Amino acid sequence: MKKTLVALSVLMAATSAQAIELYNQDGVTVNLSGDVEIRYLKDIGVDQITKQEIDDADFGFDTRYAVNDDFQVGAYFEFSGDDGDRAVGNTSVGNVYFGFYHNAYGTLKVGKLDTILDDAGIGADYIFGVNSFFTDAGFGGDEAVRYDYDNGSFYAGLGLIQDKHDDGAIGVDGHYVDAKVGYRVAGFDFTVLYGDTELKGVDSDSNALNKEDTLIAGEVRYAGIENLNLELGYYNVDSKPFGGSSTDVNTLAVAADYTWNKVTFAGGFSTTDYSTAAAGTDFDQWFLNAGYGIAPNTTVYVEIGDNDKANTDLGYGVGIKASF
């Protein structure tokens, strides 16, 4: 999964998605899950055109074998039909991993998968969201390991990625690690996140990379008021080219969403500051949206967003998303 500027998204649905059970017998289960999202939008920027995009077109099979009442092992195989916001002629391989699932000790996954920071971020945005995080490393890879633990109140996770096949930003001699710890109490959810990546491969334009990026972040969510969610996030990224001086990027974000019957209204605002002018231009960004649960796990939505960068125009979009 390749990301340049990451939209921190928590996509909402009419109800929580449930996988389709295909098989359940003698301690063996097979579940099918998937997502489809199509939207029509004009991006934030200069002289952007309005176009149709396919944001998601994925489905996967989750097979598990019960060793005993507390422990399962199994494999997950995902197919993806979208690439670069368009449908591709041939379905490609998404995440593929083997998992070990224990009721008391947590989950360990090994294979091609997304790691901890892929779950990070605040705001129920669909398109524009908050911009932050690493600029060249994605939050997943072909040679990944991920561990998650959650007892309902306390949770934690650790992810590792290597690139010994030398086909990405990390490179043979690079590394990637991310982690989180969190605690839920009295309607609050507190999360601290960390990520460190040493990039010695190539970027999406085949330019050689030789730098280290470090992320430290904190997120607070509050859901103690009926139908209302409030969120706050802070993200600091330190980027240091080997042989050069480091630069910091700091992002502070707030977001909220409110559900009324089948309609959810959401908005968010972020401000991003760069330590040097050479690293980038400080900017503020915001989004507003509304989503309607037209059917179970199916939402139609409209969203607008903008920032205060020079000569940028308002972005807008409409779309529909379904999951199972």
Image: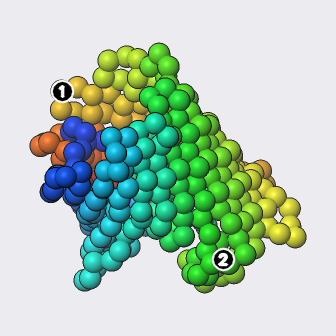
Image check: 50 left or right of 205?
left
Q: Which residue is mark 2?
A: 171
Residue 4 x %, y %? 54, 64
Q: Give the vertical position of 123 relative to 205 (above or below).
A: above
- Kind of residue at badge 2: Gly
Image check: 312 left or right of 181?
left
Q: Which residue is mark 1?
A: 261
Residue 76 x %, y %? 34, 62
Q: Disc 2 on helix, strand or loop?
A: loop
- Kind of residue at badge 1: Asn
Front residue of this view, candidates 47 and 203: 203
Most distant residue in the left direction = 295
Q: Residue at x 49, y 62 (%)?
A: 110
Front residue of this view, candidates 5 and 13: 13
Image check: 297 left or right of 8?
left
Front residue of this view, candidates 287 and 231: 231
Q: Residue at x 37, y 41 (%)?
A: 70
Q: Viewer-nearest of labels 1 and 2?
A: 2
